[in-house]
Image (spheres, grey):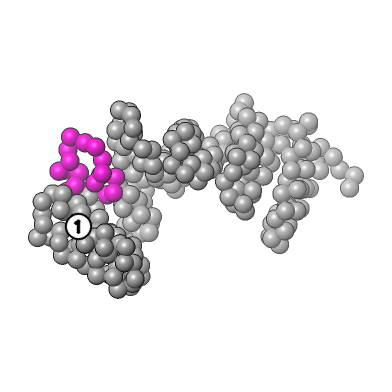
Amino acid sequence: ENTDGEIRALVLSAQTTYKLENREFDEAIKLLQEAKDSAKTGSPIFSAQIAGNLAETKHQIFGASSDVVMIYKQASEGLKNSELEATKAVLNLNLGICYQEMSQNNRGALLEAVKHYQESLKYFSREDFPEEFAFTQNNLALAYLSISLTEASDTLRVAIAIQALREALKVYTKSTHPELWASTQLNLANALQHAPSGHVEENLMEAVNLYEEILSIRQPPENPVGYARLLANQGNALAHLGVFEHAIPKLNEAKNIFAQIGENDSAEAIA
């Protein structure tokens, strides 16, 4: 009760951990807010670090919101002149995630997400931070691919997205990260299939091969919807290549799976 300044902020932060462990979320957020304010005068950098924790806590509990973005930005501003590069990179990554979650395909929000992902990648190198590097590259790609193709520069963004997915796949391999590898590989195959390019045939052939690699580790009983979508995407790519004798069996199998599990709209779309 008799503490103040940074000492009080430290004690309140410890209490916050206890409250979070006991799922007393509203109380934890109040304590973090008080801790942030308590440290502000004596140690603005410590206060900014607590602000980052406050934003992350609210983000995890209540989801992305403009309030969470504002607190992340306050933390970033407070750390701007510090040498806490790792903390700043994490804040940029979290800001990117926030904007992406809030975007609802809004161009401005997605471009903000891209900006923060690119900023975090200045620190998260593949050599020193492979997990963070791959995660950020994958998110960067998805943000770019969610932007509607309305401007000439958007074609370049698709190419950057494809390259970002290739970078992520240098970390996410079939043996080390099977699930992350499969989802990132799927993102790459989908991007290649729909990318505006002067090399359409090469892109489609690569997409077909990428889908085939994923199908080799996916089994219909585990995720019939996902498996059927994979088949449908591969069948679509094969059809665009004119390889109908291989496309039709893939599409038929996907249609049958969708029909069996009651996904009638998907089955009709494939038909």
Query: Judging from the image, what secondary structure is the residue with disc 1 in?
Result: helix
Residue 94, picture quadrant: top right
Q: Is residue 193 magenta?
A: yes
Q: Is residue 25 left or right of residue 118?
A: right
Residue visible at 34% across and 71% down in the picture: 262
Q: Is residue 43 above or below residue 203?
A: above
Question: Which residue has dot 1 on it?
Answer: 235
Residue 253 seen anywhere in this rendered image of the structure: yes
Q: Residues within 10 Å of mark 1 (few under 14, many from 20)?
A: many
Check the picture and name the quadrant holding the C terminus. bottom left
Residue 172, image x and y in percent? 36, 51
* Residue drawn at the location 38% of the way across and 55% of the way down: 180
Magenta segment, principal secondary structure? helix
Name the residue at 15% across, 43% down. Answer: 201
**Where residue 217 sits in the image (x, y, percent)?**
29, 64
Q: What is the three-letter code of the residue carrying label 1?
A: Gly
- Residue 81: percent from left, percent from top: 62, 26
Q: Is 2 or 259 nearer to us in this picture?
A: 259
Q: Which residues are magenta?
A: 189-206
Q: In the rendered image of this protein, does residue 243 appear above or below residue 140? A: below
Q: Is residue 104 magenta?
A: no
Residue 238, image x and y in percent?
16, 53
- Left or right side of 53 for 233: left
Q: Residue at x 15, y 58 (%)?
A: 247
Tell me which corner region of the image, top left, top right, bottom left or bottom right, holds residue 36.
top right
Whether residue 218 is visible: no
Number of marks drawn: 1
Q: Is residue 89 left or right of residue 71?
A: left
